[in-house]
Image: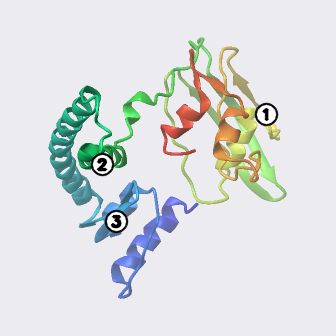
Amino acid sequence: HLDAESVNWLEQHLSKYAGAVVAVTHDRYFLNNVAEWILELDRGRAIPYEGNYSTYLDKKSTRLKVEGRKDEKRQKRLKEELEWVRSNAKGRQTKSKARLARYEEMAAEADKMRKLDFEEIQIPPGPRLGSIVVEVQNLSKAFGDKVLIDDLSFTLPRNGIVGVIGPNGAGKTTLFKMIQGLETPDSGAIKVGDTVKISYVDRSRANIDPKKTLWAVVSDELDYINVGQVEMPSRAYVSAFGFK
């Protein structure tokens, strides 16, 4: 959980560092500024790319186009073999075992190379918002002698996307907790619209039972969950993200 200032320092430090570094991060800008090699882990394979993140995207795009053409040929061959298996009434006789083995091998390869269709995974829009989303007026908050927020006022419009930045300890998490009603401001007021439903991802994951699987946490161990207005099998939903 490095803040922007710390990330900038780390980038400068690594640019002069003579040793080897392996970094695991979701910060694409950091990768673009620092990385000289990218190692992508994809369905059990490790694929190296020389260059920074932008170069990786260019090279991956080219690779996927090539793989797409290979997939089309593979699917065509697989379809032909499947048609043969279905049409051959004596397909399980000894003389046909080799061809059946070939089909099974091709099917296994196709399944291994299958791409997850993330375009089908959607975060549905929330309910229609009223005229008021979040209004903050003259908000102040301190812990002892440390003042985090002093006379803050702002209005969050409908469809607004706001990024809150600042160094660690500046009060970002405290602000979100006050909006949720988990912390009480020293002074000022926060008004959340009647139609607003707040979703918040706690980076500390304090409310998640570490003994539960991801599926159990997401689904509450129910076979079906509602995603927006759509009911779907919970295991199929999490598996679409690559989880079990």
Badge 1 marks a residue whose secondary structure is: loop
Q: Disc 3 or disc 2, which is closer to the eye?
A: 2
Q: Quadrant of residue 83?
A: top left
Most foreground residue, 82 or 229: 82
Whether 80 is drawn above or below 36: the answer is above
Q: Which residue in the structure is indicated by mark 1?
A: 181
Circle 2 is placed at which residue position?
A: 101
- Tell me the quarter of the picture where residue 189 sits: top right
Mark on residue 39? 3
Give the mark count: 3
Q: Earlier in the sequence, mark 1 or mark 2?
A: 2
Q: Is residue 151 visible?
A: no
User: In the figure, is residue 228 to the left or right of 29?
Assistant: right
Whether the residues at callouts 1 and 3 have beta carbons within 8 Å, the answer is no
Gap between marks 1 and 2, in whole Å? Answer: 62 Å
Of residues 95 and 187, the one nearer the viewer is 95
Most foreground residue, 104 or 71: 104
For the question of whether residue 49 can be seen, the reply is yes
Disc nearer the start of the sequence (1/3): 3
- The type of residue carrying mark 1 is Gly
**Which amino acid does the dot numbered 3 rest on?**
Leu
